[in-house]
Image: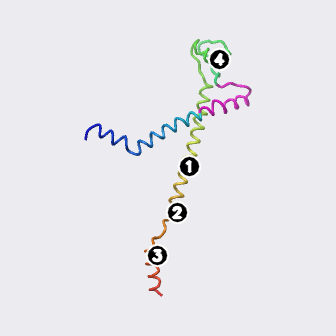
Amino acid sequence: MSMASEFKEFALKGNVMDLAVGVIIGGAFGKIIDSMVSDIIMPIVGKIIGNVDFSNMYVALSGQAAGLPLVEAKKLGSVLAYGNFLTITINFLILAFVIFQMVKFMNKMKKAEAAAPAPTPDDIVLLREIRDALKK
């Protein structure tokens, strides 16, 4: 079997296509969650804490002046940008929770499908009726 035909066989398998669709949708979903955290959740949390901008929270490691925006502080030397880390951590936790809920829902749906018994075929029902009639 040539390498081209092996690759064609591999690429056209259903699992590969499902994975590709999952990766594309997952990437788009990740951007939605990232925007939700950065643009909605973190500003609300910052407002509740006391008008804190998490994107500019850092510790200067190279003696930068206090109060500089993060971009300017990075230009002047090393910084420990813990605000960005907090934002990304919250982003991850929300994304993980949503995926957990989706998997939980899918597992529940699979159990519901598996729990429904298959209807008894007509010939089996007829044979049971004959058996019960013969017993009488």
Mark 4 in CB contact with mark 3 (< 8 angstroms):
no
**Labels 1 and 4: the sequence-earlier one:** 4
Nearer the camera: disc 3 or disc 2: 3
Separation of residues labelled 4 and 2 (CA atoms): 60 Å
Residue receiving disc 1: 104
| Boundaries of the magenta span | 34-54
User: Residue 92's x, y, as percent?
Assistant: 57, 35
The amino acid beneath tag 4 is Pro
The residue to which callout 4 is attached is 69
Kindly check if marks 3 and 1 are in contact, taking CB atoms under 8 A apart as contact. Answer: no
Which residue is more in the foreground, 44 or 22? 22
Q: Which mark is residue 125?
A: 3
- Give, as a three-letter code, the residue at label 2: Ala
- Element marked by disc 4: loop
Determine whether the residue tagged by mark 1 lies in a helix, strand or loop.
Answer: helix
Q: Earlier in the sequence, mark 4 or mark 3?
A: 4
